[in-house]
Image: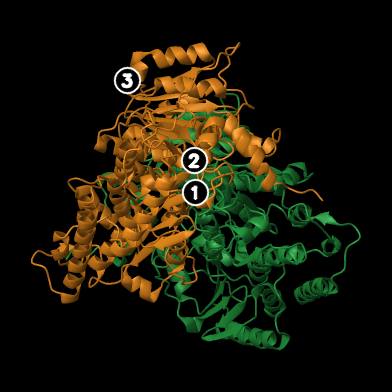
Chain colours: A green, B orange
């Protein structure tokens, strides 16, 4: 089945190439700008993020007039790129799109695009650029470096995108657009497209649009695949059903959640997740044991995973924060690694054997496990504390009781991304964090994009956890949420500064302090002057927070809500404390 | 004199090289981090901007403990880079410094650094990076791209800095630091320095620190210089004293204001300024005629400049917005161009002949003009309008009456940067705008840096003009101003969206709309909860604005003040209207 559809994708691709080689004019010519928008519409894009600028205004006319794609004007380009990233993560089988202007705009988005690269999120970055005539004569336009280097921004972008289309003429514009869009969706990485002002309204053939782009990876070599499957089946048999499945980031990014589900349901193998794979498998599934993160794991999870005779590792991404600072204790001879474009069986690597096609075939070859290795229950127990302070240890399990199925939950890098790991999230909920890239401030923009995408795909509430330090970086994007009628719940963990940094270094240093803000006044200032669209709260203790969470009106999330949660300055989730201890050792500043 | 000091600079440089070649240990070793801070202290740096991150925290300990350099923790890195830029512009003979962390932090600053490159502002960008051991083994650390490309951020930075020092060992760290700092201050451009965590506390010789770095350019070749001066003197004589001096950006950036002043005072030649040269020459000087900006100029100015027999053009930077969209009408045979590193006499270019040394020698050869060509008076007359609306035509001359000597005045790209051009600014005032780079939002960060620098150099009030659209990009930096007790006056021109864009394209388009904010609530939310540190106002008409400006308490600026100025949505300064008309022609979106 998978193989057939892969072949179909290849056929489609070849048809496009043939199309291109024939160089014939289509019967209904379209503007290049329309061509691009039609492709995005086919890929189910409904929102475009960005900031207007004089090199993209002409294209924006087409966007604003488009029947199904809405323009979301952001407050700045970094936030826009974060929003496109958040949108793409929630709206699977689509992509995020950010539109900026030449130089000033596109460079402001650099960090957001690089983050999407690092974390493997399909984002299209369109930069409106000067006309081809200007690019040839290179006048000293505003937004240039003043030295005629019109290619400097492209050179920078090449470092953070998987491919680039530098449109220069109408002849190959459609093919170039198709090429980068295909790269974007099949490789789940950002791509970069320049759109010169004079080309937006050039007319080209629409013939290629009849063949949809495919997000399926190229087909695996059948002979190699058969060999690989035989090897894996043999290892499973030798392991005598003491097999553990470990799911990670790329299972989400490369779209094999369903395939993984079929595998674990059929075999009954215990399944665990790395932090970046959280919610890739239902955290309520009875054979799911929770989060494995090397030596930082709960001891029982650590024991179960590391003692298994065979680990089927699906889409692993072994970054420091995703592995307890590289403390995985899983020997290679006991590991099979499934990736988007290769498979590793013990020490042997098989290039070109991708998991999308491999997993279903493997599942069909495996039998239900004869003995069911026990799986520790994944629950978060509310600790009994003899004070009313909102501690990290109490807060996260308490939030676990608040979550509902289909919630979209974002946790900012810091106490939030560490604290939430040990809380099981409900059925069909979606968890978003930036555990590899770790750019503070990301979730504010990402929440905007995620909330839009949640509407599109029928998910429920969007809930953000962010510290006071991080929210200051990107705070203005709350305004865009109000403006577009989105209704996220935003928990601001007010612990008076950069607590994650305090744990890494400089616990009492002033550089980890921030300005004290009146958090509950923010939404009123940023667009809800009459107080009808939003509600803000401060909770000082467990009782206040619990009362709020139990309030049905609050939980219904029918307006945007901000909750300032007063927490101790030097309290951190235990996972963060342990991570900080480990990274402290590797990052030590040796005072000679 | 200039030649002597240039030679002294060369001697100093050679001494450093000799020092380096001897590779001897100094008698009092210092940490590399301290070495860098001592160099910055010598260059009169008192503030370091940036955001803490785990790869720069160790260095931040040294910064926080430094007796004369203060850490200014910004809300985000883009704002920090803008602040460093604003600081450097006001604090002449010094530089701006921004400190970020690896990847996420440094990339967020890209646009700000590129802007400093474009506009020629000396900014040092220090990126705290992983240890050399990590850089060699390339683990998948957070803040990496996940593919081992530890050099990707350096490659991006190379596009936007004039030189880079990638510190890798203690052996050449001091020489590398000195090299990029010298490039930064002599070439007035950003430089990029990576500081690995393990090197910060390595001890090195302090011997080099005894020889201060010089910001003087390399000396001119005396024979060529004599020839060039002879040629210019001949042209001046042939012009029969019908000579005009036109001063532009690089007169400020390359530090020849005094030299220009001596030239114009001795000769009495009429002097005009390009937009980017505004306030390089006193706008109250009786022989100063105002702003020349090609066909957009006031007709009398245009006539006077373009009809002169000879134009001495000092530090010109012929960008679109600085030249009325390239409509200079000054033929090359009537032009002498003075630049930092070359001189152009009519069609002949003389490489290596820089103006810093050349101008004083030229002045000594010239005589007072025998006839005084008339100069139109540069004044801004308050128009009589038969309504009470705050129009652009009325607002700027009215502000002209409010300014005082030594004010530091920032105008954001848009209606502000165009509107203020025709208003003469007072004696010893400093004008800041980003006319070439034109990144909206820049002035908010730049105001923070400028206000700090104004304190250092004994300037007065800091006054910002910014539109509601632009302020949304970088608004959180108001918080840093409150936190550090700065007292700028911020005029928010509330015209309901991106008015400059409306004039360029899409006058009635929704993409030029923004979210309506409660501007007068901002300062209270961003750090002045009890209302003691700030004051905010809204003015709806001419009478209200005039009353406020005439209020002594307001004008004294003894707390941070924000004035929301209600202005019509589709009103723009005439210079902007004319510029938009001209760029519209070149940027036209041709609908086929």
Q: Chain of mark 3?
A: B
Mark sitting earlier along the chain (1/2): 2
Q: Answer yes or no: is residue A405 visible.
A: no
What residue is shown at x 67% (from left), y 47% (from top)? B586
Q: Secondary structure at mark 1?
A: helix
Q: Residue furthest right?
A: A27
Q: Chain of mark 1?
A: B
Q: Chain of mark 2?
A: B
* Same chain assignment for discs 2 and 3: yes
Q: Position of residue A561 (x, y in %)?
A: 55, 33
Q: Nearer the viewer, residue A327 or A235?
A: A327
Label 2 CA crowd tier, 10 Å (few <14, some 14–19, many 20+): some
- Asked if the residue at tag 2 contacts the one at tag 1, i.e. Cβ–Cβ closer than 8 Å, the answer is yes
Q: How many marks?
A: 3
Label 3 CA crowd tier, 10 Å (few <14, some 14–19, many 20+): few
Left or right of B476 in this view: A202: right
Report which residue position mark 3 lands on: B556
Report which residue position mark 2 lands on: B308
What residue is shown at x 40% (from left), y 46% (from top)? B236
Mark sitting earlier along the chain (2/3): 2
Report which residue position mark 1 lands on: B334
- Asked if the residue at tag 3 contacts the one at tag 2, i.e. Cβ–Cβ closer than 8 Å, the answer is no
Q: Position of residue A93 (x, y in %)?
A: 70, 59
């Amino acid at each position: 089945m998978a193989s057939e559809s892969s072949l179909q994708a290849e056929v489609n691709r070849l048809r496009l190439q043939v199309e291109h080689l024939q160089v014939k004019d289509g019967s209904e010519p379209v503007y290049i700008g329309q061509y691009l928008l039609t492709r995005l519409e086919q890929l189910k894009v409904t929102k475009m993020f960005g900031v207007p600028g004089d090199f993209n205004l002409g294209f924006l006319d087409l966007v604003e007039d488009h029947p199904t794609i809405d323009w979301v004007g952001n407050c700045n380009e970094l936030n826009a790129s974060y929003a496109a990233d958040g949108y793409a993560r929630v709206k699977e089988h689509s992509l995020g799109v950010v539109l900026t202007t030449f130089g000033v705009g596109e460079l402001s988005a650099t960090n957001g695009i690089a983050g999407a690269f690092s974390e493997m999120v399909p984002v299209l970055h369109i930069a409106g650029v000067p006309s081809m005539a200007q690019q040839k004569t290179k006048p000293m336009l505003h937004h240039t470096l003043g030295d005629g280097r019109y290619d400097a921004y492209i050179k920078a972008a090449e470092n953070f995108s998987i491919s680039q289309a530098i449109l220069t003429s109408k002849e190959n514009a459609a093919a170039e657009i198709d090429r980068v869009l295909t790269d974007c969706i099949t490789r789940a990485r950002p791509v970069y497209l320049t759109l010169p002002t004079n080309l937006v309204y050039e007319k080209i053939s629409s013939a290629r649009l009849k063949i949809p782009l495919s997000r399926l990876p190229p087909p695996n070599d059948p002979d190699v695949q058969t060999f690989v499957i035989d090897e894996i089946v043999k290892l499973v048999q030798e392991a005598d059903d003491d097999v553990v499945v470990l799911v990670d980031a790329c299972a989400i990014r490369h779209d094999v959640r369903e395939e993984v589900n079929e595998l674990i349901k059929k075999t009954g193998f215990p399944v665990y997740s790395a932090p970046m794979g959280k919610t890739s498998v239902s955290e309520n599934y009875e054979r799911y044991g929770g989060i494995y993160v090397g030596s930082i794991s709960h001891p029982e999870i650590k024991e179960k995973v590391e003692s298994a005779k065979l680990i089927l590792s699906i889409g692993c991404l072994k970054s420091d924060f995703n592995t307890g600072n590289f403390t995985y204790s899983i020997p290679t001879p006991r590991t099979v690694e499934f990736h988007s474009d290769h498979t590793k069986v013990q020490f042997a690597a098989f290039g070109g054997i991708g998991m999308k096609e491999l997993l279903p075939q493997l599942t069909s070859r495996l039998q239900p496990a004869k003995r069911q290795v026990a799986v520790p229950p994944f629950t978060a127990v509310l600790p009994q504390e003899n004070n009313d302070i909102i501690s990290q240890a109490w807060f996260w399990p308490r939030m676990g009781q608040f979550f509902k199925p289909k919630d979209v939950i974002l946790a900012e890098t810091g106490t939030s991304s560490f604290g939430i790991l040990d809380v099981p999230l409900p059925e069909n909920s979606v968890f978003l964090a930036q555990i590899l890239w770790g750019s503070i401030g990301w979730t504010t923009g990402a929440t905007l994009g995620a909330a839009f995408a949640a509407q599109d795909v029928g998910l429920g509430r969007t809930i953000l956890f962010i510290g006071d330090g991080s929210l200051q970086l990107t705070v203005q994007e709350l305004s865009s949420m109000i403006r577009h009628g989105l209704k996220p719940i935003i928990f601001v963990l007010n612990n008076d500064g950069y607590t994650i940094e305090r744990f890494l270094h400089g616990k009492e240093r002033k550089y980890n302090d921030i300005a004290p803000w009146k958090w509950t006044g923010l939404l009123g200032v940023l667009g809800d002057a009459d107080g009808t669209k939003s509600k803000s709260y401060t909770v000082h203790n467990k009782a206040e927070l619990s009362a709020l969470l139990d309030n049905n009106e609050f939980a219904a999330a029918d307006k945007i809500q901000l909750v300032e949660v007063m927490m101790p300055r030097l309290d951190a989730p235990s996972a963060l404390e342990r991570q900080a201890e480990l990274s402290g050792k590797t990052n030590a500043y040796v005072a000679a």
